[in-house]
Image (cartoon, coloured by chain):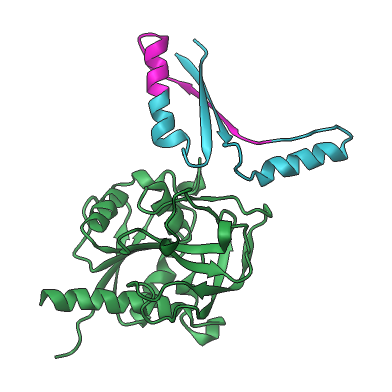
Chain colours: A green, B cyan
Amino acid sequence: MASPQPRIGVVTYPGSQDDRDALWALAALDAEAVPVWHDERELPDLDAVVLPGGFSYGDHLRCGAIARFSPTTAAVREFAAAGGLVLGICNGFQILCEAGLLPGALLRNESLRFVCRDVPVTVERDDLPFTARCTAGGRLVLPVKHGDGRYLPPPDLDPAQVVLRYVENPNGSVDGIAGVCNEAGNVMGLMPHPEHAVDPLLGSDDGALLLASLVDAARERVLATI
Amino acid sequence: MKATVLVRPKPGILDPQGEAVGSALGHLGFEVQDARVGKVIDLEVEAADESAARAQVEQMCERLLANPLIESYEVEIVG
C-alpha cells in the first residue's frame, strides 16, 4: 500500500504573506497542502495545521492580537486541545502566543530594525513531531524576516519547552529563544521560516527537516486511524 | 461615555523605543533619566454610569487592549 498523504492545512488571514510558500513547501514534501480561509468556523478534515507568516490584520494593536479572535483561530484552538498538531511560523507564532496556545510574547526587536537574513539556530529537542528529523544539539540555517521577534518567556517557562535557540541573537530574544512548544508538545511556534528553506536553490534546505518531521508525524496519525 | 486607556510596557520589560526616544531627547540637550513609550486608546462606550463604563473598559483591556505579560493598563473615564 502506498503511504498515505497527510492533509495539512495552511490558514490565510487578511495580511498573511507566506501562506503560498508554506503550501508549496508542504506539497513539495509530499503532504496534501490544504488552504484554509480565516473565516471558516470549522476546519476541514486535517492531520495538522500551519499558521503562516505575514502581517495578519496589519499587525494592529499588537502582532497577532486581532487574528486571535478570527473564527478559524477558534477552530485551531479546538484542534490543538484535541491533540492536533499546530505549527506557527513568525506571525503564526505571534498569533499562537496571543491566543494563549503558546507561552510568552513577541516584542519589537531590540535594535528597532527589521531583520532579514539567514541565521543559524541550535535544535534543543529532537523528540517532537516538529523536530524528529533533526538532531538535538545540531544546527539549522534558516531565514528570519521580522520586526517583532524578541521573545519574552513567562517567568515560569519550563526550559524543556525551548525547541530552537539562535546561535547569534538577531532580535534580543531572552536566552536566544527562537522557537518554543506547549507543554504537551503538539503546538510549536518559531520566528525563523522553514518554508523558505526547503530547496538548496533558496540558500538552505534545513527548513525541510522541520516541515518533513511535521509531515511524517501527520502521516503517522493518518496510519493510526486506518 | 468617553474613556481613555493608557497602555504601558511593564516595569522591567526592555523598551527599545523608549530608549531611542530618551537618547534623541538627550541629543536635543534635554536631561532625561528614563523614557518609556506606551499607547493611548480613546473610546466612546455605551454605559449607564461611570462605574459600569469602567467595568466594561477594564474587560476590554483584559481581553484585548493590553497583553498582561508585557503591559499594564490604566483606565480613565472622561465622562
**Residue at the extreme bottom:** A1
Query: Residue A42: horizontal and vertical position, in percent?
Result: 21, 53
Query: Residue A27: horizontal and vertical position, in percent?
Result: 34, 78
Could one spot residue A34 in this view of the protein?
Answer: yes
Query: Residue A210: horizontal and vertical position, in percent?
Result: 41, 76
Q: Quadrant of residue A6?
A: bottom left
On the rendered image, what quadrant is the C terminus of chain A found in?
A: bottom left
Q: Residue at x 86, y 32 (%)?
A: B30
Q: Residue at x 28, y 70 (%)?
A: A8
**Residue at the extreme right:** B29
On screen, residue A86 versus residue A45, left or right, reads: right
**Residue at the extreme left:** A226
Nearer the observer, A49 or A57: A49
Q: How many marks?
A: 0
B54 magenta-colored: yes
Q: Which residues are magenta?
A: B36-57
Nearer the observer, A25 or A222: A222
Could one spot residue A190 in this view of the protein?
Answer: no
Q: Quadrant of residue A19?
A: bottom left
Q: Quadrant of residue A117?
A: bottom right
- Residue A202 vertical position relative to residue A183 in the rendered view, above or below: below
On screen, residue A105 versus residue B20, left or right, reads: left
A140 magenta-colored: no
Query: Residue A194: horizontal and vertical position, in percent?
Result: 46, 73
On the rendered image, what quadrant is the N terminus of chain A found in?
A: bottom left
